[in-house]
C-alpha cells in the first residue's frame, strides 16, 4: 500500500500531465464553440510538452549550461549527472513553434467559418448546413 | 527542481486550464489561456528548461494571446459553453 502511495506521490508531474491531456481531449470532443475547441487543442499540446520536459529532469541537477566554461583553465571534467537532460527540451522547442503555426491556421479557419455562417457554435453551423 | 514551487504551479496550471474552458466569454477565455501559457513558462523554468521557458513566454503567452484576441475581435465574444 505504501508502495503504491509513494509511486503516485513521486510521479505527480506525470499525473498532472495526464489530467491536462484529458482536460484538453474533453474540450476538443465536448465543447460546442470552435474557439473553445482550439483552446482545448493547445492545452493538449502543452500537456505533451510537459511530459517530455518531465523526462529530462534529474534530482539535484542544474540547467544545461556548462559551469566554469569561460576562462583559461579549460572545461575540466563534465559530469552529465550534474545537468538536466537537454535533448527533450530541444525537441519541444520545435513543438512549441509548430503549435503556434497550427493555432494560427485553426483560428484563420474559424474566422472563415464565422464569415460564412455568422456563428461559432458547432450545432448552429450543422443546422444551417442541413437546411441548405 | 524545487518541488513545493513545482507542485504549487502545477495546481495553478490545472485551475487556469479548467477556468479558461468554463468561462462564458471568449475574450475571457483568451486572457485566461494567456495566463495558462505564462504558468507553463514558470513551470519550465522550475524544471530547468530555460530555452523552452523563454520560447513559451514569447511565443505561447505573447503571440498566441494576440492571435486569440484578434480572432475574437474579428468574430464574436458570444458563447454558450
Image (cartoon, rainbow, N blue to C red):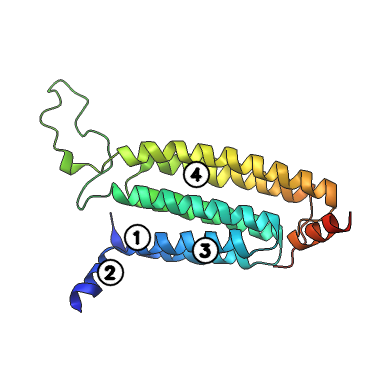
Label 3 is found on which chain of the structure? A
Residue position for label 1 = A14
Q: Which residue corresponds to the image point at 30% horizontal and 49% vertical from the top-left?
A: A55
Cα–Cα span, label 1 and label 3: 14 Å
Mark 2 or mark 4, which is nearer to you?
A: 2
Dot 4 lies on which element? Answer: helix
Mark 4 or mark 3, which is nearer to you?
A: 3
Q: Which residue corresponds to the image point at 56% horizontal and 52% vertical from the top-left?
A: A41
Within 10 Å of the Cα at label 3, are there few (<14), some (14-19), or many (20+) other Cα atoms?
many
Q: In x, y percent, where is residue B13?
A: 47, 61
Cα–Cα span, label 4 and label 3: 22 Å
Q: Which residue corresponds to the image point at 23% horizontal and 73% vertical from the top-left?
A: A4
- Kindly indicate whether the residue at mark 4 contacts the one at mark 2 (C-beta within 8 angstroms): no
Lower sequence index among marks 1 and 3: 1
Dot 2 lies on which element? Answer: helix
Mark number, residue B57: 4
Amino acid at each position: 500500500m505504501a508502495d503504491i502511495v509513494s509511486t503516485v506521490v513521486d510521479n505527480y508531474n506525470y499525473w498532472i500531465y495526464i489530467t491536462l491531456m484529458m482536460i484538453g481531449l474533453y474540450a476538443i470532443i465536448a465543447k460546442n464553440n470552435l474557439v473553445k475547441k482550439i483552446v482545448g487543442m493547445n492545452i493538449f499540446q502543452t500537456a505533451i510538452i510537459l511530459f517530455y520536459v518531465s523526462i529530462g529532469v534529474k534530482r539535484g541537477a542544474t540547467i544545461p549550461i556548462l559551469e566554469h566554461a569561460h576562462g583559461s583553465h579549460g572545461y575540466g571534467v563534465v559530469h552529465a549527472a550534474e545537468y538536466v537532460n537537454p535533448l527533450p527540451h530541444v525537441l519541444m522547442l520545435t513543438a512549441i513553434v509548430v503549435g503556434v503555426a497550427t493555432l494560427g491556421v485553426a483560428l484563420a479557419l474559424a474566422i472563415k467559418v464565422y464569415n460564412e455562417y455568422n456563428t461559432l457554435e458547432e450545432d448552429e453551423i450543422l443546422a444551417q448546413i442541413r437546411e441548405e | 527542481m524545487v518541488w513545493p514551487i513545482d507542485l504549487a504551479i502545477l495546481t495553478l496550471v490545472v485551475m487556469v486550464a479548467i477556468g479558461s474552458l468554463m468561462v462564458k466569454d471568449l475574450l475571457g477565455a483568451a486572457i485566461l489561456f494567456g495566463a495558462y501559457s505564462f504558468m507553463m513558462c514558470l513551470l519550465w523554468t522550475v524544471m530547468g528548461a530555460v530555452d523552452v521557458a523563454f520560447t513559451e513566454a514569447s511565443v505561447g503567452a505573447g503571440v498566441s494571446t494576440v492571435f486569440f484576441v484578434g480572432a475574437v475581435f474579428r468574430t464574436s465574444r458570444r458563447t454558450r459553453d
